[in-house]
Amino acid sequence: MLGNDALSQLKQLKTDIRSTKEFFEGDVVGSMSSYGFIVNGDTRHFLPPNEMERVFPGDRVRYCLVDGRDDQKQAELDKLIESPTTELFGVYRVRGTNHFVEAEFGRSSRWLFVPPAKRDKHEDGDLVQAKVIRHPYKTGKAAVQVTKHFGAPSAAWAKHRFVEARYNLEPINEQLDVPSKPLLTRDLDLTDIPFVTIDSASTRDIDDALFAESTDNGYRLVVAIADPMAYIAEGDQLDSVARSRGTTTYLPGVQLPMMPSELATERCSLLPEQVRSALIITMQVSDSGEISDYEFKFANVQSVAKLSYNDVAAHIDGEKELEASEAVLSSIETLTKVQKAIYSWRSANCLVMEDRHDYGYAVNDEGQLTEAVIDRRNSAHRVVEECMLATNRTAGSFLASHNKGLFSAHAGFRDERLETVAQIVSEQSLSEPSDAIDLAQFKQIMQAASEKETADQPLRAPLTRMLQPGIVTPNPAPHFGLGFDHYATVTSPIRKYQDLTNHRAIASILNQTDSTLDQEAATTLGESIQDAQLAARRASNELEQWLSNEHYGAQLQGQTLKARIAMINAGGLAVQLIETGCEGFVDLRKQKPSLDQTYLRLTLGEQTFVLEQQLDVVVKGYDAQQRKLQLTLA
């Protein structure tokens, strides 16, 4: 046994050693293997498996650097600063007498022990929610307790309920008190304008209706947008619920609306032959597609017809004449001209995205996928999209001129990728060198990239992968991705709280009243809306891929199919099957390919793979644990 002097000396020695170390702070991220990383700003430090066992992805830690294999520096933990992981979702696992929850942490997973006293009658493979009852930092052994049981993955609607809970997407309380009459009445009557809605045949929550006519100097485009302000007062119970949800979420076979269906699909919806309050945006569009003038006002309108995308597209393309009044047919003809003019102007002055089909997923009465359906973009989709882009761009200009509202902004390239961007720009002569890329130069770079790229050498796709994510902000700022000076969405107030907020901002400008949101409150609201929109997108994508990969993994096994390369890394190709929308990864690590990180090209022998390239892949099966298709190159 050591004496007091020896213990004191040992303690002092540890203190002396520790004082010579340099400590850092960072956030833990997981990997597909047992190791992890600590991210500190733009740097990443390797965290070996024995250290990774002591933390969860997302933990904030203090660490120092020590020598690892091959004299490479790696992280050594010193202190757990914060752990945001208090609850988690995953799969219940039974191995002999031991019980675990295989918890999901993004792309990685961990098996966490369930103590005997905390067990219940759960089966191996059941979907569960659990809470952390012992963090692993001190011992490397975490413990959890199941708090919610969703059943086996094959149980009716189990996957839906699991994903809804994981992203905090509870169904709305349809018993909320909805006013029997509008809270606001509109004096202006525009029910004589033959507005029409163009949407999917099954849509009931109709946000917009369109009308266009020719003028001496171009076209008059009139867009009517549903007016939930007529029924929802700022700060009331309905408003609080809509604000907390932030957006309507669409899952396969399920819609989780932002507001009660009585409002979303009835009283606010621009249903045909029903008088509705609406925000009216009138735009003067030149023959060349430039919006030369605009006006905002609130009025009563009455849509004369609800038309489907397919029927309108067939009419526009000359395949089948639409059964409608002369006024409606004339308006659709003019809307088509407006779409072509605005698109031409945008192509020359802004940035346009490549048409890409959407995928719909049909489910049965038990929530299991029955088929994936390609929702192919057609002429009618383009008409509506161009009118909505024009409306939101105009709203952005109007709100920016009064410094009110919430803007959808996009700041261009990520700071850590600017050096790579500069290399591509220089090598491909896309623009003059510049220390800071403003909106004008960004548009020049992306337009030049589109013109110079080839199938073997895409330029726009790798540049697009280097962009920052968009944000929702009260500060008027450009949207680099679209090439717009300002962009503020107003066209979906039934489905998006951001749009409802912008309706209120427009009303305050028209009525010359002060905004109810100060800068700090508006910033906080923008961030919460942004979080809600991100959660909705992630939930929808996760469930769609889970259902479709499981369904088609067995059905398509052994088949050779066309796929599109969506992303490339040093280990292989992330691809999307063109006919089903399923996503999978072609693992090429054993073949040791070479990655060009600048242009995101992968070379394997004499083969080179680039972004957006189409190729043939073989479906080998479905990995239930990873919920991914197992793919190989054909």
Image: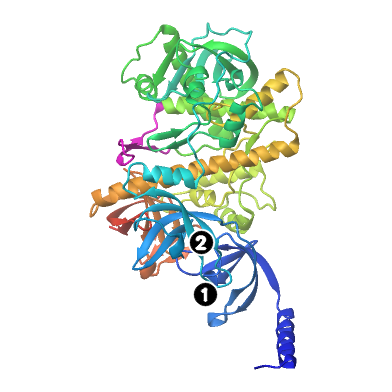
Q: Residue at x 38, y 10 (%)?
A: 324
- Applied colour scheme: rainbow
Q: Tell me if residue 106 is in the magenta stretch.
A: no
Tag 2 or tag 1, which sits nearer the N-term?
1
Q: Residue at x 48, y 58 (%)?
A: 145
Tell me the kind of residue under disc 1.
Answer: Asn
Residue stretch in magenta: 356-379
* Residue designated by label 1: 50
Q: Residue at x 34, y 39 (%)?
A: 367
Crowd rating for badge 2 (residues with CA inside 10 Å; few <14, some 14–19, many 20+): few
Q: Is residue 559 left or right of residue 90?
A: left
Residue 620 seen anywhere in this rendered image of the structure: yes
Instruction: Looking at this view, name the residue that lies furthest to the front.
Output: 117
Seen from the viewer's position, the closer of residues 157 and 569 is: 157
Quadrant (top left, top right, bottom left, bottom right) of the C terminus = bottom left
What kind of element bears circle 1?
helix
